[in-house]
Amino acid sequence: MHLAVRLLLLLATPLALSQSQPHPGHSEGNFTDSSHQEMPGTGWGSPSLRIVSSNTDFALRLYHVMASESPGKNIFFSPLSISAALTMLSLGARAHTQTQILQGLGFNLTEMTDSDIHQGFQQLLHTLNLASGTLETHMGNALFLTRGLQLLPKFLNHTMAFYESQLFHTNFCDSVGAAQLINDHVKKETQGKIANLVTELSKDTMMVLVNYVYFKALWEKPFSPSKTSPEDFHVDASTTVQVPMMWQDDHYHWYLHDRYLPCSVLRMNYEGDVVAFFILPNPGKMRQMEEALTPEMLTRWNNLLQKRAFFYRKLELHFPKFSISGSYELDQILPRLGFAELFSEQANFSGITKTLNLKMSKSFHKAILDVDEVGTKAAAATGFSVVFKSAPKNPRVLRFSRPFLVVILSTSTQSILFMGKVVDPTKS
């Protein structure tokens, strides 16, 4: 019998936009902004922060593989969802399979125990799922088991305790009904954003592992819908498409043109503990920028765009309104990142059940990103009046009319929630 562990890692990200100015004392570039209330247990040295560097490294390694396999195409995924699903799966793996999963995710098992890792994800998921005003971030897991499959109590208890997993008994012999059960659950948990995800399931499926993420946030500084108009977007040297381009010229933003790399970097804040970095390579320099994209580079940009008042400047910003998605068969990608045994006959999942010799057949990931002008909240403050006076009078112009990268970060957990590349915003 086979264990079909389908990691349906689902993300819906409608980025609603709302207007406000920074509050007095707001540090706009810090992953742990003082203007936001610190989540319980997320201070320095906490379990969730001990896994940040490994998660970041895995996210960028995964991006590089995706980019090399899909040149010239949109990319969008949630590395944190994939990491969380794999570490959850490792609870049922044994021997070399378990070691390979954790080492493939970048964890140094001589410095961290597997218990440390699971406690880190437990705290991270708890923090992300806390209510935070207008910011909606919800990550969860579900196990769909064939009726009669007896899970080991330790695996069942740990998936629920560390990963808040829900358990559903399923009749996979009724493949249509099983798919409907999964689709209904996913639709509910993603606020209706993801529907009819599963179209067919094999009747020999014994278990489906689902990891989902729902993310909805409001821009601190929205675009006015009345100013959106069609403009050219240059996909490559020979391809131009028309996109609805949003526009604003009356806001200050954190942005810089890198003096060492051929790119501009814009930091956009959401209401709540999330920020986005949009990285715009110079024309023809996307591959060079991708090769330079490292954890150290992200840290450098973040430090510059939070501590240097010079980079908080009035900006004429042109940004496309778009919707893109990414669908990936992880069983085709993960072996290139050190997970060679995971989908093989040698994989050991005896920590899940003793009654069957299980094998993982497939692994899927799907993510969706929507960006528009929507804004529902307004606020104002004068805390940055000194910065305004010191900024140049003439606004810079930053036009996202060619392919760019996006990285969305949770500041309270210092984790990359989503990342990708927008090559053609007209292709969803």
Image (cartoon, rainbow, N blue to C red):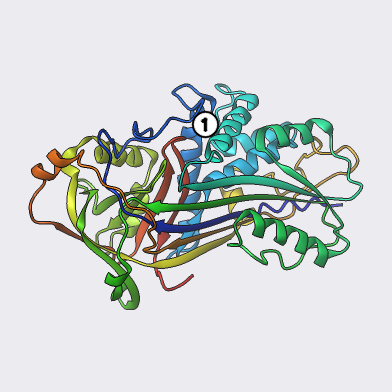
- Residue 195 placement (x, y as % from top left): 64, 65
Q: Nearer the viewer, residue 185 or 64?
A: 185
Question: How many numbered marks appear?
Answer: 1
Q: Nearer the viewer, residue 374 or 165?
A: 374
For mark 1, does the 10 Å Cα neighbourhood hold few (<14), some (14 to 19), or many (20 or more) residues?
many
- Residue 58 placement (x, y as % from top left): 50, 42
Q: Is residue 73 visible?
A: no
Q: Is residue 80 above or below residue 53?
A: below
Q: Which amino acid type is marked by label 1?
A: Ile
Which quadrant of the figure has residue 328?
bottom right
Q: Is residue 272 visible?
A: yes
Q: In the picture provided, is 184 more to the left or to the right than 286?
A: right
The residue positioned 87% from the left and 52% from the top of the image is: 1
Q: Which residue is mark 1?
A: 51
The residue positioned 26% from the left and 41% from the top of the image is: 305
Q: In the picture provided, is 427 more to the left or to the right than 213?
A: left
Q: In the picture provided, is 176 more to the left or to the right than 372?
A: right
Q: In the picture provided, is 196 more to the left or to the right than 292?
A: right
- Residue 121 placement (x, y as % from top left): 59, 34
- Residue 266 placement (x, y as % from top left): 28, 51
Q: Is residue 234 above or below residue 287?
A: below
Q: Nearer the viewer, residue 346 or 390?
A: 390
Question: Circle 1 sits in a helix, a strand or a loop, which is it?
Answer: loop
The residue positioned 44% from the left and 35% from the top of the image is: 412
Q: Nearer the viewer, residue 85 or 167?
A: 167
Q: Is residue 359 above or below residue 413?
A: below
Which quadrant of the figure has residue 299?
top left
